[in-house]
Image (cartoon, helix red, strand yellow):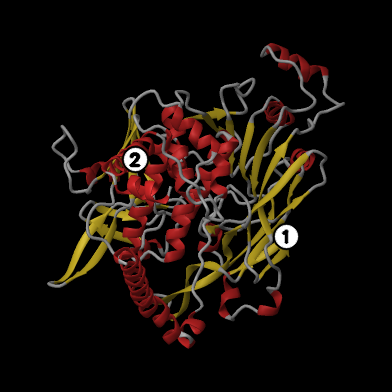
């Protein structure tokens, strides 16, 4: 029996069978690909929403990734992570998904122009990168972005939201965590033929001049954006998914509030940026003091019914922006210096919510606080808050430039995380429930609608700062990006071969996130929840046990190989010695 088995092992047939089995296994492996994700945060697992979108593609999806070239380690890692993610997409629909790494200096097919010029036109921000080489330093303009092209439509995907050439490990982790969301969001826009409608309410003193320029430019590419006069129009149209109310200055009538109420009851979404107080920086240009007082917009009661209250107060924060102050000199030749202005807080995105995950500071101006009101069935999420060194002042309040003559008293700035923006989701009760008038019902009948006392599931966002999404306008430069201070914006300008551009502000990102969350598939928004944990090594422990780890990583593999070699020689020696005997 034993000799028969050894005879089979020694036969040529056995080795041919083994070779055929290996070929068969490799062929099956190429036909049926499968991987097991053992990472705790499921780094290499696509959500069901992402998988379904990819599987439904019925035409080629061409992805150009502009991370080709010599980069520092941070951007090389980002390029590798992007390639790994694209392989995940190809696993779901390999015949339709195609990706290529491209240099911005490469020529676009059939255009005669470099990709870089087109990318700037699409809104990409170039980074002036300095690479160390043997011959010295080399300057290189890179675009950490990708383009998705599907059925003749093309969209831009930001792979790295920053503008710093020295990308940190934490920033890489944030970019990797948001990568699925960025790609799926763009793919949803490509495959969805209908553009969501966003209306900009006018008629109550909302800005329609150059201050609203960046709102229009930010939203008009991805949404059907239009002005809507709440005074003259009989009702808000059904194809308007979101209605924006930005810094109204005139009181709302009951007829206008009724239109807003029934818009919400029918599933419409509100995106409100409200200044509850009259407090303007321009008032301090001629006087060193101004009084902040209530605008009396007549919106407090309707917001209260929905579950939120904008308080008639002002938020002050030691974490804030700067403005120029006269600190010396003469009347003809004043000496100016930039000092912190506590009424311009740099607001912090609240941790743990999907909407503003991995987002930077948001600049505010004369911000009010918000409170949550108990309303059954309404889920409330705070979106923005102050730092740990903030305070609230009641109104009417005197705002004076003389406040910055002395350092702020820190003991007054003890409040933490004062909420200034809130997301509300659920089924809202009508503000006019049980008290709708016959005249109001007749007005609805003229539009072909019926009064609804309770809404379908919907959502709204209320922000207690009307200036957050507006932009400054300079006499020569024109409109600036929203959120940037007109006094200090030059510090953020950068120059490249593609012209002058601004580092993106978090205010614009916050506006886009709000709009996307209100109109997009909630399952897509949930992909923002992915978190890649940065597991740092214990530096003191590494230093203490340096020799031990060097032996384990360098000497131990060599010793194991030598032992394996000795064991093999002993087994071979024993085998052939027994055979000869």
Residue 40 vertical position relative to residue 355 in the rendered view, above or below: below
| Image side of residue 564 versus residue 115, left or right | right
Q: Earlier in the sequence, mark 2 or mark 1?
A: 2
Query: Which image quarter: residue 419?
Result: bottom right
Residue 543 seen: yes
Residue 122 seen: no
Closer-to-camera residue (195/489) = 195
Residue 199 vertical position relative to residue 277 in the rendered view, above or below: above
Q: Are marks 2 and 1 in contact (CB under 8 Å)?
A: no
The circle on residue 26 is 2
Image location (x, y in percent) of residue 5: 39, 47
Give the residue displayed 49% in from the left and 68% down from the top. Answer: 322
Q: Secondary structure at mark 1?
A: loop
Closer-to-camera residue (382/98) = 98
The circle on residue 526 is none
Image location (x, y in percent) of residue 209: 46, 41
- Spot the residue most to the front: 581
Closer-to-camera residue (274/526) = 526
Q: Secondary structure at mark 2?
A: helix
Query: Which image quarter: residue 576?
Result: bottom left
Closer-to-camera residue (187/92) = 92
| Image side of residue 303 versus residue 437, left or right | left
Give the residue displayed 73% in from the left and 36% down from the top. Answer: 426
Give me the C-alpha separation between circle 2 and circle 1: 78 Å
| Image side of residue 371 versus residue 358, left or right | right
Quadrant occupied by the C terminus: bottom left
Give the residue displayed 56% in from the left and 57% down from the top. Answer: 364
The circle on residue 396 is 1
Mark 1 burial class by Cα count in 10 Å: few <14, some 14-19, many 20+ = some
């Amino acid at each position: 029996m034993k000799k028969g088995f050894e005879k089979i092992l020694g036969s040529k047939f056995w080795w041919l069978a083994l070779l055929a089995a290996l070929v068969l296994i490799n062929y099956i492996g190429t036909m049926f690909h499968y991987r097991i994700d053992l990472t705790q945060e499921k780094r290499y697992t696509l959500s069901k929403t992402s998988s379904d979108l990819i599987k439904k593609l019925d035409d080629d999806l061409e992805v150009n990734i502009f991370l080709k070239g010599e980069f520092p380690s941070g951007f090389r890692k980002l390029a590798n992570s992007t390639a790994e993610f694209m392989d995940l997409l190809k696993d779901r629909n390999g015949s339709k998904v195609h990706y290529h790494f491209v240099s911005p200096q490469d020529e676009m097919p059939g255009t005669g122009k470099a990709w870089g010029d087109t990318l700037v036109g699409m809104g990409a921000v170039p980074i002036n990168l300095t690479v160390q080489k043997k011959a010295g330093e080399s300057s290189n303009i890179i675009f950490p972005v990708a383009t998705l092209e599907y059925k003749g439509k093309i969209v831009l995907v930001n792979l790295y939201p920053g503008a710093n050439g020295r990308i940190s490990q934490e920033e890489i982790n944030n970019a990797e965590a948001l990568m699925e969301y960025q790609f799926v969001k763009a793919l949803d826009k490509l495959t969805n033929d209908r553009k969501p409608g966003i209306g900009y309410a006018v008629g109550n003193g909302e800005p329609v001049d150059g201050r609203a320029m960046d709102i229009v430019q930010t939203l008009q590419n991805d949404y059907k954006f239009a002005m809507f006069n709440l005074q003259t129009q009989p009702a808000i149209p059904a194809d308007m998914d979101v209605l924006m109310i930005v810094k109204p200055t005139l009181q709302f009538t009951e007829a206008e509030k009724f239109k807003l109420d029934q818009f919400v009851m029918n599933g419409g979404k509100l995106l409100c940026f409200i200044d509850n107080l009259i407090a303007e920086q321009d008032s301090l240009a001629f006087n060193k003091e101004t009084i902040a007082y209530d605008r009396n917009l007549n919106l407090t009661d309707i917001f209260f019914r929905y579950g939120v209250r904008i308080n008639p107060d002002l938020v002050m924060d030691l974490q804030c922006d700067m403005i120029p102050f006269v600190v010396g000199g003469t009347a003809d030749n004043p000496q100016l210096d930039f000092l912190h202005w506590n009424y311009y807080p740099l607001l912090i995105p609240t941790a743990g919510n999907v909407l503003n995950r991995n987002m930077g500071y948001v600049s505010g101006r004369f911000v009010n606080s918000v409170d949550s009101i108990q309303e059954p069935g309404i889920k409330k999420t705070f979106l923005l808050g102050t730092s740990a060194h903030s305070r609230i002042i009641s109104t009417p309040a005197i705002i004076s430039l003389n406040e910055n003559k002395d350092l702020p008293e820190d003991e007054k700035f003890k409040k933490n995380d004062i909420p200034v923006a809130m997301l509300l989701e659920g089924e809202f009760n009508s503000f006019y429930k049980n008290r709708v008038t016959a005249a109001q019902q007749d007005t609805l009948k003229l539009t072909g609608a019926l009064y609804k006392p309770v809404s379908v599931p919907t959502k709204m966002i209320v922000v207690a700062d009307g200036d957050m999404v507006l932009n400054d306008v300079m006499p020569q430069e024109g409109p600036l990006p929203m959120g940037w201070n007109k006094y200090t914006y030059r510090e953020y300008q950068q120059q490249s071969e593609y012209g002058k551009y601004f580092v993106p502000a978090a205010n614009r990102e916050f506006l886009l996130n709000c709009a996307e969350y209100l109109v997009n598939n909630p399952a897509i928004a949930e992909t923002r929840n992915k978190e890649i944990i940065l597991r740092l090594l214990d530096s003191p422990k590494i230093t203490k046990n340096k020799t031990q780890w060097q032996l384990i990583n360098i000497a131990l593999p060599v010793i194991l190989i030598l032992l394996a070699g000795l064991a093999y020689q002993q087994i071979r020696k024993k085998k052939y010695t027994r055979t000869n005997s």
